[in-house]
Image (tube, helix red, strand yellow):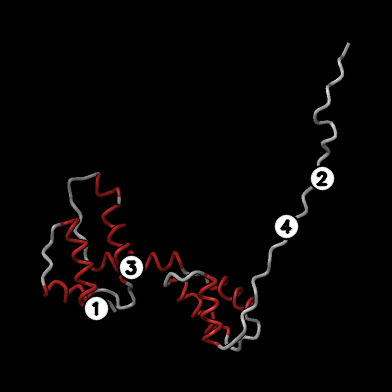
Amino acid sequence: MLDETQVGLLLAKISLYDNRAVIDPVVIAWQEALDPKISIQDAKQAVIDFYGDPRWAEGTRRPWIMPADVNARVLRMRRDRMLSVADAQLLTLDRMPSNPDLAESTRRLMRLTADGLSVEAALAQVSREMGVRLLEAPVPRQAERPKIDVSHVGRRMPKIA
C-alpha cells in the first residue's frame, strides 16, 4: 500500500497536469481508494499514460484523473506483464523439475512477473522461496542452414551467339 508521502508525491505529479489542489484530505481520500497492491512506479506510469493519451487532444474536454483511472491502468499494465498460466507452468516444469508444488510456483511466478520482475529474476526468486534447484535455461539449437550453391557467383555468363 502506498503511504501518505507516496500518494502526496503522486498527486503533486498529477497537479502538474490538471492544477488540482493537493491538500491532506485529498491525499487521504486517494490513499483509501487506490488499490493496495499498486507500486509507486506503476502509479506514476499510469498517470503519464493517462495524460499522454492522444484522445484528450481531440476535444475541448480536459481530463481529470481519478483513483479508479489509476487502478484500471495499473491492472492493465500488470496483466500485460504477467506470464500466462500455461507459460508459467511450462517454465516451472522445465526449469524446476524437482518442485513439489507446481500450483504455488506457478502463482508466484505469475505474480512476480506482473510486479515487473524479469522472467529470469522471477524464476530465481521462486526457486529460492521453494527451496528447489533452478536449472539453466536450455540453449536453443540453431537450425542447420541449407547449403546454397554459390560456385557460379563471380563467373562471367557465356555469350550467346
In-image side of 98 versus 40 (left or right): right
Q: Rounded to the nearest whole Å, what is the CA distance between mark 3 and mark 4?
A: 39 Å
The amino acid on which the numbered mark 3 sits, given as a three-letter code, is Gln
The amino acid on which the numbered mark 4 sits, given as a three-letter code, is Gln
Q: Rounded to the nearest whole Å, what is the CA distance between mark 2 and mark 3?
A: 51 Å
User: 10 Å neighbourhood of mark 3: few (<14), some, or many (≥20)?
Assistant: few
Secondary structure of residue under mark 1: loop
Query: Where on the picture, by quarter, is residue 143?
Result: bottom right
Q: Identify residue for label 3.
A: 41
Image position, residue 127 (x, y; %) = 56, 82
In-image side of 20 versus 74 (left or right): left
- Mark 2 / mark 3, whichever is N-terminal: 3
- Quadrant where the C terminus lies? top right
- Mark 3 / mark 4, whichever is N-terminal: 3
In the current view of this chain or complex, which residue is farthest to the right?
161
Image position, residue 83 (x, y; %) = 51, 69
Mark number displayed over residue 3: 1
Q: Residue at x 62, y 84 (%)?
A: 133
Q: Rounded to the nearest whole Å, what is the CA distance between mark 4 and mark 1?
A: 50 Å
- Mark 3 / mark 1, whichever is N-terminal: 1
In-image side of 43 versus 100 (left or right): left
User: 10 Å neighbourhood of mark 2: few (<14), some, or many (≥20)?
Assistant: few
Q: Identify residue for label 2.
A: 147
In the current view of this chain or complex, which residue is farthest to the top?
161
How many badges with numbers are in the image?
4
* Mark 4 and mark 1 residues within 8 Å of each other at the beta carbon: no
Q: Identify residue for label 4.
A: 142
Image position, residue 29 (x, y; %) = 17, 75
Mark number displayed over residue 67: none
Secondary structure of residue under mark 3: helix
Secondary structure of residue under mark 2: loop
